[in-house]
Image (cartoon, rainbow, N blue to C red):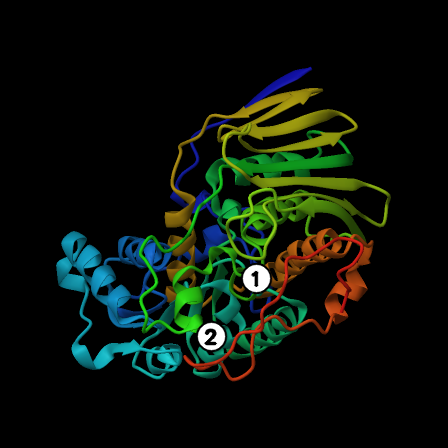
């Protein structure tokens, strides 16, 4: 048995194994960061001004001293003011959003992408992601795209088309599936690809957390329409979140699962799931999904959002020569090779924005679009299997006609009342 350690990794190596692609194919991120930087100001527009969007905007400002925030958009006007105050408290001189560049309403994204920005951050509820990404790419903007990329198969197909157009047009798309930008996991993935655990035999991922309660802490007022109320409290409405437990929480886990498999996608999924807590919405709060690959390997996802239970967020990959485990943010390999990450720790949320802006500066734009769309479909396939109780193939999932997003959404639209899924009764569409 041999002992190996990982140390002395500098900033250029942080994004080495991020699994991203450039316009012309696979890209080594150190080549991007090694080139002379372009010091021209990059203007960033934020679409979705909640906590995650504000955090992403701050990461963009910290990634490059010549970045300025110049436009903001949100369906709800109060969100913009709150986000502005937070950002200005931290970096006041580079938050330059005048009144003419604050856009509200359900079409706020269009105002941002049509303004004089170079990069857009897409951080609304996931239901709007395909529409907003298409608008950004059509307008020639680089994008940071929070997870998930879509909530259903029609949305995934739209994202794939946008990713292909972005590649043709030389536009960057960096995904909020952020674990691929974590330095420790990048080092671990390199070990796995180099054979440290041998051939992979099984994968197991957990995302077991307390329930997240309501997203909106206030009370519904008489003037709030159903659409406004549900957007404010979007966590547990299927048409907005796609299922918080399986798609958003579980999405991170299946993205890592795909990464360990070198982005080879499963051929089918079987799942069980339900809602134990009856208080919120029409999505599940627990699911166990089994993904099967062509070579017979199985990947298992355990995802739960219920308080008072055992919590765990981790990964285990079993190979013919060893086992990789990732728990408590510590990547470890045991077996014929004993290895643990001993390099520097750095926020993956920051590293992904460093990578995005460096790739734009140096003319080699990262395009995560295809892999984030496929990871999203993998999570959607798991939800389909859990909700229907059927085995769902990759081909079925990709061709599904189930469209969860209401057509021509307006504030006074009537959102169809979709009942909680019942496995064995709910149909696959």
Q: Residues within 10 Å of mark 2 (few under 14, many from 20)?
A: many
Residue 228 is marked as: none
Quarter of the view holding residue 212: top left
Relative to 316, say whether 383 is above or below.
Answer: below
Q: Residues within 10 Å of mark 1 (few under 14, many from 20)?
A: many
Mark 1 or mark 2, which has the lower sequence index? 2
Does the rendering let one see residue 365? no
Element under label 1? helix
Does the rendering let one see residue 193? yes
Q: Residue at x 55, y 63 (%)?
A: 149
Residue 238 is marked as: 1
Q: Count all numbered tags in the image, as a single digit.
A: 2
Query: Percent x, y for residue 176?
Result: 48, 55
Relative to 76, say whether 308 is above or below.
Answer: above
Element under label 2? helix
Residue 132 is marked as: 2
State the CA–CA distance, disc 1 to disc 2.
19 Å
- Residue placed most toward the observer, 130 or 230: 230
Q: Residue at x 48, y 83 (%)?
A: 138
């Amino acid at each position: 048995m041999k002992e190996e350690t990982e140390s002395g990794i500098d900033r250029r190596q942080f994004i080495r194994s991020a699994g991203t692609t450039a316009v012309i194919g696979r890209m080594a991120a150190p080549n991007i960061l090694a080139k002379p930087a372009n010091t021209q100001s990059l203007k960033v527009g934020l679409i979705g001004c909640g906590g995650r969007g504000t955090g992403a905007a701050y990461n963009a400002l910290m990634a490059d001293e010549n970045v300025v925030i110049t436009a903001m958009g949100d369906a709800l006007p109060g969100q913009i003011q709150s986000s502005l105050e937070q950002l200005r408290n931290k970096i006041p001189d580079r938050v330059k959003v005048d009144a003419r560049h604050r856009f509200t309403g359900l079409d706020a994204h269009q105002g941002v992408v049509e303004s004089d920005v170079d990069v857009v951050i897409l951080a609304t509820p996931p239901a709007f992601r395909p529409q907003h990404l298409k608008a950004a790419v059509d307008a020639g903007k680089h994008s940071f795209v929070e997870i998930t990329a879509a909530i259903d198969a029609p949305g995934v197909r739209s994202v794939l088309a946008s990713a292909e157009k972005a590649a043709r047009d030389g536009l960057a798309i960096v995904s909020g599936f952020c674990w691929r930008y974590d330095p420790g996991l990048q080092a671990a993935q390199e070990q796995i690809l180099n054979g440290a655990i041998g051939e992979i035999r099984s994968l197991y991922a957990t995302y077991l957390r307390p329930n997240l309660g309501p997203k909106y802490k206030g009370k519904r007022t008489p003037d709030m329409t159903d659409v406004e109320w549900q957007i404010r409290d979007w966590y547990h409405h299927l048409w907005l979140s796609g299922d918080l437990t399986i798609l958003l929480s579980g999405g991170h886990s299946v993205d890592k699962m795909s990464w360990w498999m070198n982005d080879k996608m499963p051929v089918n999924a079987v799942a069980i799931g339900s809602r134990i807590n009856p208080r919120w919405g029409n999505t599940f709060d627990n699911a166990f999904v089994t993904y099967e690959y062509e070579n017979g390997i199985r990947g298992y996802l355990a995802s739960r959002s219920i308080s008072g239970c055992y919590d765990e967020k981790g990964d285990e990959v079993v190979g013919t020569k060893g086992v990789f485990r990732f728990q408590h943010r510590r990547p470890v390999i045991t077996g014929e090779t004993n290895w643990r990450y001993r390099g520097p720790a750095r926020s993956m949320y920051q590293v992904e924005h460093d990578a995005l802006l460096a790739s734009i500066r140096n003319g080699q734009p990262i395009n995560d679009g295809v892999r984030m769309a496929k990871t999203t479909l993998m999570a959607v396939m798991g939800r389909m299997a859990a909700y229907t109780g059927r085995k769902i193939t990759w081909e079925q999932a990709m061709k599904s006609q189930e469209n969860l997003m209401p057509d021509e959404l307006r504030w006074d639209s009537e959102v169809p009342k979709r009942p909680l899924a019942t496995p064995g009764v709910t149909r696959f569409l």
